Image: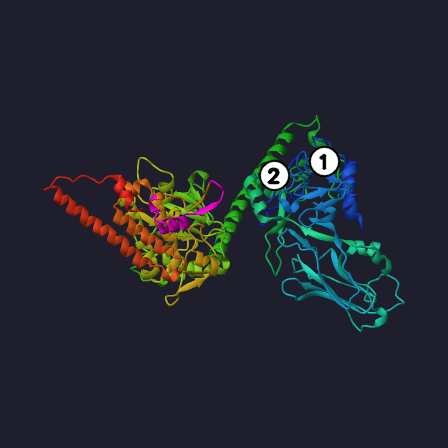
Amino acid sequence: MALKTKSSGWWLKMASTRAAVTETGPTTAVSSVRFSLQRWQEREEATVSDRGARRRRPAAMATEINYSIADSPAIAKRNCPTSCGKVSIPFPFGVGENCYLEFNYAVNCSSSNKLFLRSINLEVLDISLEKGTMVVNHPLFNSCQINETKANVNLENTPFFFSPAKNRFTGVGCNNFASMYSSSTDLIISGCLSVCDKTNDTMSCNGIRCCQTRIPSFLNLQRFNASVSTINYSKERKQEYKYAFLVQQDWFEEHIKTLDQIQGFEHVPVVLDWGIYDRWIERLVRNSSRRYLSTTNCTNFANSSSQVPVSRCKCLKGYEGNPYFFQGCQDIDECEVKVVRSEHCASNMTCLNTDGDFLCYPSQILSPTKSKVNMVLLGFGIGVAALIFLIGVWWLYIIIKKRREIKLKERYFKRNGGLLLEQQLTSFDASVDKGKLFTSKELDKATDHFHVNRILGKGGQGTVYKGMLTDGKIVTVKKSKVVDEGRLEEFINEVAILSQINHRNVVKLLGCCLETEVPLLVYEFIPNGTLFQYLHDQNEELPLTWEMRLQIASEIAGALSYLHSAASLPIYHRDVKSANILLDGKYRAKIADFGTSRSIAIDQTHVTTKVQGTFGYLDPEFFQSSQFSDKSDVYSFGVVLVELLTRQKPIASTGSHDIRSLATLFILSMLENNLVDILDPEVIKLGKKEEIMTVANLARRCLNLSGKRRPTMKEVAMVLEGIRESKKESNDQQNHEEGEYMISKVSEPSEFNKFYL
């Protein structure tokens, strides 16, 4: 923008502020930077230096530019080494604990001042923060065989990629075909042919004894196999070495002049592109001030063929520093540096630094002979322009953020099978109570943004939170750790089925949320904790009577019987244990945690799957065969019955530090007629011996090592319900007799014990 007045001829040139807001733009930065002219020119010369200078630049920066502590930009973390030998070490890389972002960026400095990347154990020759590249010493593959293939360094599961722009795949030798193969598909990625011509001693690499080819730019290459094969094989060339390797193009052109030189190398420089995982960028965005939008730009490594969660960040023009720090990109004071550039101020102009840019204005504006009104007007105009700009940037940021959130939710919803679940729910009978699809906003508000104070418990499948919906209903929200995309369709089918189950002894699945990275399941809230807590963390205020134990066992047996046979599709729980049995406000049992459950076709008798469950409750037959059936749930329920009888944990350590199984101890006690030794004294005191023996024998049948000899859950439920009914009739009869007869004397405890001996 240029301002001009007729009277004075003064003009004001304002360079456009280069604060850009991009959709990929999460970034940050640290302290302000003030360079001298000499130091700034040295950095500019290092940036445009020709071949080979990349390997020398970090050393030059470390030794020639000596920043003061007060004004220097934070290249590395405080109290962390900034260089090793001649190689600078910018964050996210670092030597020592708390100096690097994560293990992928951990480096070691050897006693010989050589830098090594710990995750792949390669020597690092250069790390460029500005370009997002790293030069490493990569092994040189050679062979004297007719045909040989060798796997190269594996960069998978790291934020590093072989640079397609800076490297060339090279083959050296006579009549050889050098090729790159995909390690996973065995498909050729790239290759070239070198023919034989003894007269060619130069290293032009034009196909005569040496050939080069590019890596396809659409690949995010992290792993490949190098292969070299001889064409037109002859005995006189049997021992001639052949080479197939990836190499930094600039280094190869500068240092390799003849073929004989290659024989002296075991490693050659290779350029790796690097960035940081998007999850770290999201954290930078959450923890940074709004200023990051106008100082830093991050772009994803994604291309036309793949999507990778790794991005590379740079400070925008007019800023410098480390974009991987909070507030790392700081304004360059062009007026202090006196940058030589095309837009520099004329000799009769004065420079005024602004955030990310500068202003040129006539020197007379600030002349003592002129009115101070000019200064006020100038400051007011700049302030208004800056305010309008900031408001525009803020609103643009809000719009972009909302759009990104909406797109991210849509992507998660589709990935988590939301469309399939909607189709499943609409296909059900309208009279059936269907599960609800909650929004992430609803559950975020219900759990106070998943605050740590809302956590009810953590397990192998995920974390459980307590929440309150907008209608005041208390719910339990389960946030899974991972989702198995291979079982996505099956998972959605099970959610649809479980949401229709309306059994008083099964925790009701109210619905789910599929707009998040992992699905969130919403269950009814059960207030009184788990059966495990009441059994093993004894509560004197609420002792577990024999009647309560019978009731809990009968209710859980009935619920499992319903899941096995009465549901629309048979459902195997696969993790029946006292910790998954909840007690409601009236201490009725409800079975919960269907995180590992499986539904099967009606005509199936078992399902083959990987071994999952809890030791102590795990069916030995399932552990050996990996075939889970309804009888596997029966075995786990048998262990719960034994817990109710003995009040002992399913797995415990003995005095000799051996692991003891409660199921095994129970079976041995019954075989040796020593059941009374392991029974809970409260059971002996309050229960009838006939009822106790009936339950014990039932538990013994459930714990049979052969699944075929175990009863079904329906049979188990009938036995337990029969005990309760007979007990109820006996109590009614006893109450009637007490109205006519006196209470008879209770037998001595010693006589009761004789029944078990």
Question: Where's residue 38, x and y in %?
Answer: 79, 37
Give the vertical position of 721 relative to 737 (above or below).
below
Q: Amino acid at mark 2?
A: Phe
Q: Position of residue 19 (x, y in %)?
A: 62, 43
Return the residue at label 2: 326
**Residue bearing the label numbered 1:** 335
Quarter of the picture containing the N terminus is top right
Q: Is residue 548 left or right of residue 376?
A: left
The disc labelled 1 sits on which kind of residue? Answer: Cys
Mark with earlier residue (2, 1): 2
For discs 2 and 1, the disc positioned in front in the rendered view: 2
The stretch in magenta equals: 655-676
Is residue 314 among the parts visible in the rendering?
Answer: no
Q: Tell which residue pokes out farthest to the top in this image.
A: 368
Camera-nearest residue between 673 and 291: 673
The single residue placed furthest to the left in the displayed view is 740
Check disc 2 and report its element: helix, strand or loop.
loop
Is 550 displayed left or right of 729 in the figure? right
Please state the horizontal and vertical placement of residue 55, each as a whole percent of the image. Answer: 78, 47
In the rendered view, does 297 fall on the left or right side of 534? right
User: What is the distance, in whole Å, between disc 2 and disc 1 at their CAs?
Assistant: 25 Å
